[in-house]
Amino acid sequence: MISPRTLRNLRKELRSSALAKIGIVLVLAMIVVAAFAPFIALHNPTNQNLDENNLPPMGFSRTTQETTSEMVNGSLEVTNETVYVNATASHPLGTNSLGQDVYSRAVYGARTSMMVGVLGTVLAALLGVTVGLVAGFYRGRVDDALMRFADVSLAFPSLVLAIALIGLWGRAAVDVPDPFVVLGLVDPVRQALGLPTGMPDSFVLPGTVIVVVGW
């Protein structure tokens, strides 16, 4: 449980921190976009239309070379023509090479971002606390083995380790937030390590333990 004093400090920090307010607004906006994606998106994000591929976003245009050929007096003449492609209101952020609407894909992508963030955080907290309690209860070799895993995780920059894990697992790492679970394990493990014996780990401050796993 979070103590009343901690809650008061959090409320005080929230009132005085502009960045915290901006962060809350952004998170709430992402939640709304993810929840109402079918109503906010203009197109189905998976539909392909090669006739409208590579359209530029609103306010921009691009040029492309089109080659045409025709028979003139029994000979084939090839003509290169420069064509200007303008943005359309139906695709405000343009389209990709398959003709899929970028805006709609970004809107639906909020669902994947929320799933990875929330599910990764929850799984990391649950698994990390369990590992920490086991290590703290048994100590000895079990504690050493589990803590060495945590130390190895801390030895690598989180972004580099996340890229390596995504490259290892491929597409499955996007659908199931395994890299983020691995990256978020260390803090809960350290926090829960001293609970079974009442002897906190040197990384844990005495008092109420608040497990906060970064997204």
Image: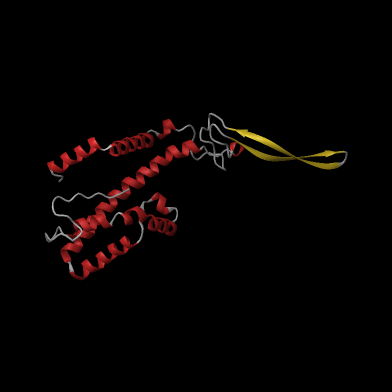
Q: Residue 80 vs residue 7: left or right? A: right
Residue positioned 40% across, 49% down in the render: 175
Query: For this rendering, which residue is in front, 65 or 106?
Result: 65
Q: Residue 86 vs residue 212: left or right? A: right
Q: Residue 194 vs residue 184: left or right? A: left
Residue positioned 28% across, 53% down in the render: 124
Vertical side of 64 occupied by 125: above or below: below
Query: Quarter-wise, where is residue 203 in the image?
Result: bottom left
Vertical side of 193 occupied by 110: above or below: above
Vertical side of 14 occupied by 179: above or below: below
Residue 22 horizontal/vertical position (percent):
32, 36
User: Which residue, as the protein is rendered here, is positioned at the far bottom?
Assistant: 141
Query: For this rendering, which residue is in front, 207 or 195?
Result: 207
Residue 169 horizontal/vertical position (percent):
42, 57
Query: Quarter-wise, where is residue 88 in the image?
Result: top right
Residue 42 horizontal/vertical position (percent):
48, 31
User: Which residue, as the protein is rendered here, is positioned at the far top?
Assistant: 89
Residue positioned 18% across, 70% down in the render: 140
Query: Looking at the image, how many numbered discs can be counted on the residues?
Result: 0
Vertical side of 143 occupied by 169: above or below: above
User: Which residue, as the protein is rendered here, is positioned at the far left?
Assistant: 198
Residue 17 horizontal/vertical position (percent):
26, 38
Asked which colour scheme the image uses, the reply is: secondary structure
Residue positioned 42% across, 53% down in the render: 172
Q: Residue 87 vs residue 71: left or right? A: left
